[in-house]
Every structure is written in C-alpha cells, then in structure tokens.
Image (spheres, grey):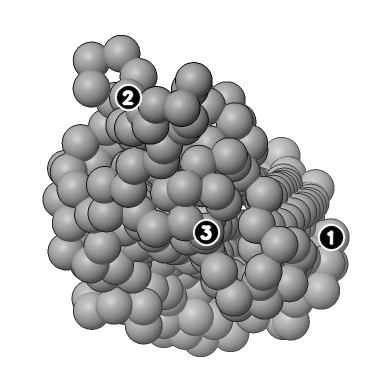
C-alpha cells in the first residue's frame, strides 16, 4: 500500500521503498505502520506475494507469538530474501515460525539471524529447490531451519540452541554448517516429515553437544561424509538402509544412550568406512541391522570398552584398526570377519 504526507498543504503520495535494482525493502517501520509494498498490509507478518528480491534494512521484532515476521504466499516461486546482516526476533513463545514458507520453490534466505520464535526459525513445509545460506538460527522452539521438501540446501549456517537443529528432505544437502547445543537432534533426515526423504547428503559440518543424535538419517540412502561429530547425548551418527558413512571424526557421544547406541549406529545395508571413532559411550560402532560393511575404520577406546558391536547377523567387518578397547569386537550375532582387522 501507499502512504501519504502533507507538505505545505499538498498531499504527496509515497510509493513503497525500493532499494537498488528494484529490490523491495523491508523494515520495522513499514511493517508496523504502513505495509512495506503492494500486497502487504500494515502489521506482521510482512506478506510476500510476488516473485523477486527483498532486503531487510532494519531488525524486525515480533511481539505476538502467533505471528510470523515474514510469510511467503503458498506456492510462490523465485524469491530471494537478503536479511542484510539484520536479525528477525520473536517473543520467545507461541507457535509461529520466523519466516513461514508453504510449498514454495526456488527461495533463498541468506545473511542474517532468525531467533526466539516458538515455531521454526525458517519453516519450509513442502518447499523445494530452496536454500538457507549464511544464516544464524538460534533459540527457536521447533527447528532452527526446516526445509521439508525436495532438493533443498542448508549451507554455511550456525544453528544453535533450538529445540531441533536442521530438518532436510529428499535429495537435500546440509554442508559446512555449525549445528550445536540444540535440545534434541542436530540434523534430522526423515520420510516422516513430508513424503520420502532418500538420498540426502550431510557433509563438512561441525555437529556437537546436541541433546539426542548429532546426525540422524532415519530415511534411506544418506551420504554422511567429512563431519566432526562430538559430545551428542544419545548417539553421534545414525544411518539407515543403503547409506554411506565415511571420513567422519566421531568422538565422546552417547553419554545418555543405551546398549545399542554409540558413536556410529548402522541400521542395515550401510557402508561405514574410513572414520576415526573414539571414546564414545556404549559402543564406538554398532550395527543393529543386516548387510552392513564396517571397513577401514580407526576405532579407539570405547568408554565401556567395546570397539565394534555386531548386534545382528549378516554383517562384514574388515581392515579396521582397534586400539585401547577392552573388547575390540563384540560379536554375539555372528558377524563375518573379512580379515585385515588389527589391534595395537
């Protein structure tokens, strides 16, 4: 909508602010006083109904826990939201997400902070081919960033102190993030969100001191590679059927786990290779399904003395290095020793 000013008795209409190159501006003043552009009414949430680029020019503070700060129209495509280093802050209660998305496509949210909302920081139910880049999501009452659709990306974000960290769906990528001190899980990949969630990639992240799992691939065919995962309370990494867990450093997880938990837990038909796994409670590596291959890992000093637990039959372990474990291999279910395992 347009505002107007009285200058010397003359009514002057003021068009919605546009930054350089037609980028639409969003700030606290226009949000609560006039509406920030065509299609947006006065008050929160700021409603984004058109494709294009948007930029924050101030912090946004929302005092009503039932209201989001920014809301994208359902099904809207091709939107860039540049937070421009500013913070979108909620009241610390309620159920609303900071940035609410629904079945959107090709949306990028970048460069700022979303904090203290009762729902998700960035909530993307059913959204696809979208990206969260260079964000900090902290202190939100659900997920910090939840992209619950296909082929989404979360990159170079800091996600800390939320109820859960990051949720990603089918074909998603979680890369080069710091995910820490969330109440429950750091990174969650699951078909229980919206449809199947196969073939996600989790790579290059620091994942630490989350209250349940560090990385939980509850769906199939995850690639979990080159992450540093430590101090998570129930387990470090859990991988389901058809996954590959490789090149990770996994240390001091599972202090509040159970006898089948540990540093890396493989559910079935998963390859666990070339990881350095040390000082995890219960087990450094545990398999609880069949058809897993545990190969060429360096498995050091499980806190309860078990390096590798073969908790089900039909699994292969080969070429692993064991050091400092009371029991290198606990094999009650008859896993297959493929040779080349060494203790030192």
Q: Is residue 314 left or right of residue 208?
A: left
Front: mark 1 or 3? 3
Q: Of helix, strand and loop, which one carries label 3?
A: loop
**The C terminus, quarter of image:** top right
Residue at x-position 46% and y-position 27%: 9
> Which residue is found at the position 57% from the left and 25% from the top?
85
**In what element is the residue under mark 2?**
loop
Do tag 2 and tag 1 residues touch (Cβ < 8 Å)? no
Q: Is residue 90 left or right of residue 80?
A: right
Please state which of residues 337 and 200 is positioned toward the viewer in this rendering.
200
If you read the primary sequence from the N terminus, does the residue marked by circle 1 or circle 3 appear first? 3
| Pick the front one: 106 or 199 | 106
- The residue positioned 59% from the left and 75% from the top of the image is 66
* Residue 279 can be seen in this image: yes
Residue at the image position 32 percent from the left and 48 percent from the top:
1
The x, y position of residue 310, in whole percent, is: 53, 75
**Which secondary structure lies at badge 1?**
loop
The spot of residue 322 in percent (x, y) is 66, 47
Q: Position of residue 96 (x, y in %)?
A: 55, 71
Q: CA distance from mark 2 to mark 1?
A: 59 Å
Residue highlighted by disc 2: 18
> Image quarter for residue 178?
top right
Task: Specify which label sits upstream in the sequence, 2 or 1.
Answer: 2
Q: Which mark is residue 303?
A: 1
Which is nearer the eye, 51 or 240? Answer: 51
Does 214 appear above or below 218? above
Inspect this view and state whether residue 205 appears.
no
Query: Label 3: which residue?
Result: 43
Report crowding for label 2: few under 14, some 14 to 19, many 20 or more residues within 10 A (C-alpha). Answer: some
| Disc 2 to disc 3, C-alpha distance | 19 Å
């Amino acid at each position: 909508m347009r505002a107007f000013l009285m200058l010397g008795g003359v009514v002057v209409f003021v068009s919605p602010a546009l930054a350089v190159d037609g980028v639409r501006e969003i700030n606290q003043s226009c949000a609560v006083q006039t509406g920030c552009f065509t299609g947006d009414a006065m008050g929160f949430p700021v409603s984004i109904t058109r494709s294009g680029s948007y930029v924050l020019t101030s912090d946004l503070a929302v005092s009503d826990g039932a209201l989001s700060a920014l809301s994208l129209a359902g099904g809207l495509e091709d939107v860039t939201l540049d937070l421009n280093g500013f913070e979108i802050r909620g009241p610390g209660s309620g159920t609303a997400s900071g940035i609410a998305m629904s079945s959107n496509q090709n949306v990028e949210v970048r460069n700022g902070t979303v904090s203290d909302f009762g729902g998700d920081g960035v909530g993307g139910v059913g959204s696809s081919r979208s990206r969260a880049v260079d964000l900090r999501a902290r202190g939100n009452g659900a997920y910090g960033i939840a992209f619950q659709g296909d082929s989404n990306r979360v990159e170079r974000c800091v996600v800390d102190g939320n109820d859960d960290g990051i949720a990603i769906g089918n074909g998603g990528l979680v890369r080069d993030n710091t995910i820490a001190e969330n109440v429950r899980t750091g990174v969650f990949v699951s078909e229980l969100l919206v449809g199947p969630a196969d073939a996600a990639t989790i790579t290059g992240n620091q994942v630490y001191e989350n209250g349940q799992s560090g990385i939980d691939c509850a769906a199939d065919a995850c690639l979990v590679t080159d992450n540093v995962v430590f101090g998570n309370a129930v387990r470090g990494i859990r991988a389901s059927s058809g996954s590959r867990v490789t090149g990770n450093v996994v240390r001091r997880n599972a202090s509040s786990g159970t006898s089948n938990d540990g540093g890396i837990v493989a559910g079935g038909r998963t390859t666990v290779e070339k990881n350095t796994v040390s000082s995890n409670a219960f087990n450094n590596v545990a398999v609880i399904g069949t058809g897993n291959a545990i190969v060429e890992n360096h498995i050091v000093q499980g806190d309860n003395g078990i390096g590798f637990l073969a908790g089900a039959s039909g699994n292969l372990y080969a070429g692993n290095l064991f050091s400092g474990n009371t029991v290198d291999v606990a094999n009650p279910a008859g896993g297959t020793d493929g040779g080349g395992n060494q203790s030192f």
